[in-house]
Image (cartoon, grey):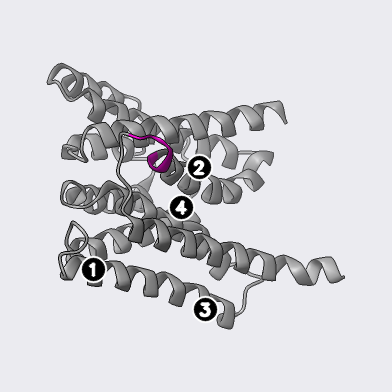
Amino acid sequence: MLYAALLVVVSIALTVLGVSALGYSQGELPALALAIPALWLLPQGGLRAWLLLVGLGAFGAVLPEQPLALSISIFMMLPVFSVSFSPKSGWQLAALLISIVLAMDVGLMALQGEGKLPGYASYTVIQVLAVTLIWYVARSWRPVEGNTWWPLFLVIPLWVGGMEHAALVALCVTGLIASMQEMMKGKLREWVPRLAWVLPAVGFATLVLVPYFEVPNPVLVAWLLVLGGALLGEFLLEEPEEEL
């Protein structure tokens, strides 16, 4: 139990540190910074590692052109997907939750199209698809034995090249994956779905609480509504069990 709590605390700390570093870098991340976490899993990770690389690459490619708060808020789709595609969930609940997410995303993209919110609607679509792919990979993931550690040395040229924040982001993402893998290897597997709720919320809350970062009001409202929908879905799933 103590070991599980330690992994959770480490995961939360890495999320806060990674989002903060991402914010201070203004979203400017070289492809190498996003490739390091996936390369760490290759070749043992197989197709899933390659799909993760595609998801991270697509998300990061448009990151500099998007408001950071909007990019981070999209990860709130993870708990929505977890509830929607739970074995206990019906198609009606899944349709309701996904419609909430789509409504919020379309609303934000409409504001971007009108110039009332920075970024581009097409880039928001790319990030939504990238996070969806990341969720799919995470859902079907199997722990990798004997990870390849040499890619971590690639943070050295990033650090030497004056991209300390990018190097820190790469290390934090790799650390998060390592922590999740450790949980999935044994009896700690049940903690992983809960982190799908905690980490996206902690990441966005970091941007809200740190005065240095700017969170547009429409993004905050959309994030709160998606969070509320996910919580409602979780409540509806648990209610029948309580009645029994």
Q: Position of residue 196 (x, y in %)?
A: 52, 50
The residue at the point 35 percent across, 35 percent down is 211
- Tell me where the magenta segment starts and ends, as one range: 207-211
- Residue 146: image location, x then y, percent: 44, 31
**Mark 2 or mark 4, which is nearer the start of the sequence?**
4
Q: Residue at x 14, y 21 (%)?
A: 162
The quarter of the rendered structure image containing the N terminus is top right
Label 4: which residue? 138
Magenta segment, prevailing SS (helix, strand or loop)? helix
Quick check: 70 left or right of 144? left
Q: At numbered mark 3, what does the secondary structure look like: helix, strand or loop?
A: helix
Work out how far the residue at label 1 is from the one at label 2, CA to CA, in angstroms. 41 Å
Q: Residue at x 37, y 62 (%)?
A: 132
Sequence-wise first label, 1 or 2: 1
Is 82 above or below relative to 97? above
Mark 2 nearby-residue class (10 Å; few <14, some 14–19, many ≥20): some
Task: Decide if residue 227 is on the left or right side of residue 121.
Answer: right
Q: Which mark is residue 16?
A: none
- Is 153 drawn above or below residue 131 in the view shown? above
Q: CA distance from mark 2 to mark 3?
A: 32 Å
Judge the density around disc 4: few (<14), some (14-19), many (≥20) Cα neighbours within 10 Å.
some
